[in-house]
Amino acid sequence: MNKNKFSTKYLVEMALLVAIILLMAFTPIGYIKTAGLEITLIVVPVAVGAVTLGPTAGAILGGVFGITSFIQCFGMSQFGALLLGINPFLTFLVRILMGWLTGLIYHGLRKTKIPSAASVTIASLCCPLLNTTFFMGTLVTLFASTMRESFGMGKVLPFIFAFVGVNGVVEAIVCFVVGTAISMALKKALRYS
């Protein structure tokens, strides 16, 4: 998509992915709520956009995801409300980096001799892994002292392992399967190289 980066086709596809992210963010489709944790499925359209439209689209879609995460902090997410008081900007930045890096990973893999299907699969898997790694890294770095004070250190580590274990694995599996399938279908149907 290098020739006409902001062609009508590109903008329509971006608008559709933004609409999907907004739909998922503000309906139960985007988050699976468990006991205290929220598994996000919004990484799927971010991964699809990063793979099919490139790193810039991945960053934009990640930014939209970050904006919806920020909005969720105002009463829609208990965990988000807790984080809002400490540093909401970093959640937004983490989402942008996740989308941008997913697009870069895909484009980097395409320059190697790795088959296209494998490049799509690896990039689709990297998106939720980057999301979880960046989010948990930010959470531990910025909020560890607050979490220790609120919950005690004995409860912080099990929370982190549960969060990474449950959320990260479910998000990775869903994005790996669904993101790869959608990206491959779009690349074939829309004749992306």
Image: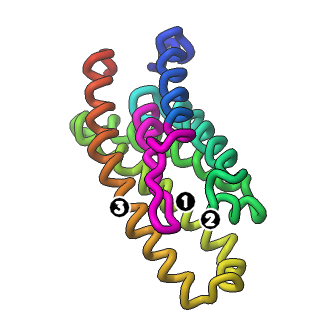
Residue type, label 1: Phe
Residue extent of the magenta highlight: 24-49
Please give left or right for residue 9 compared with residue 140 in the image: left
Determine whether 94 is above or below 142 in the image: above
**Residue where numbered disc 3 is placed:** 169
Residue 100 sits inside the magenta stretch: no
Residue 44 sits inside the magenta stretch: yes
Classify the position of the C terminus by image quarter. top left
Residue shown at the point (69%, 65%) measured from the top left: 82
Q: Are marks 2 and 1 in contact (CB under 8 Å)?
A: yes
Distance CA(mark 2)–CA(mark 3): 19 Å
Residue type, label 3: Val
> Which quarter of the picture shows residue 139?
bottom right
Marks 1 and 3, the one that precedes in the sequence: 1
Determine whether 129 is above or below 59 in the image: below
Please give left or right for residue 43 compared with residue 84 in the image: left
Viewer-nearest of labels 2 and 3? 3
**Residue where numbered disc 2 is placed:** 138
**Residue where numbered disc 1 is placed:** 134
Marks 2 and 3, the one that precedes in the sequence: 2
Secondary-structure class at tag 2: helix
Viewer-nearest of labels 1 and 3? 3
Distance CA(mark 2)–CA(mark 1): 6 Å
Residue shown at the point (76%, 65%) measured from the top left: 86
Secondary-structure class at tag 1: helix
Residue type, label 2: Thr
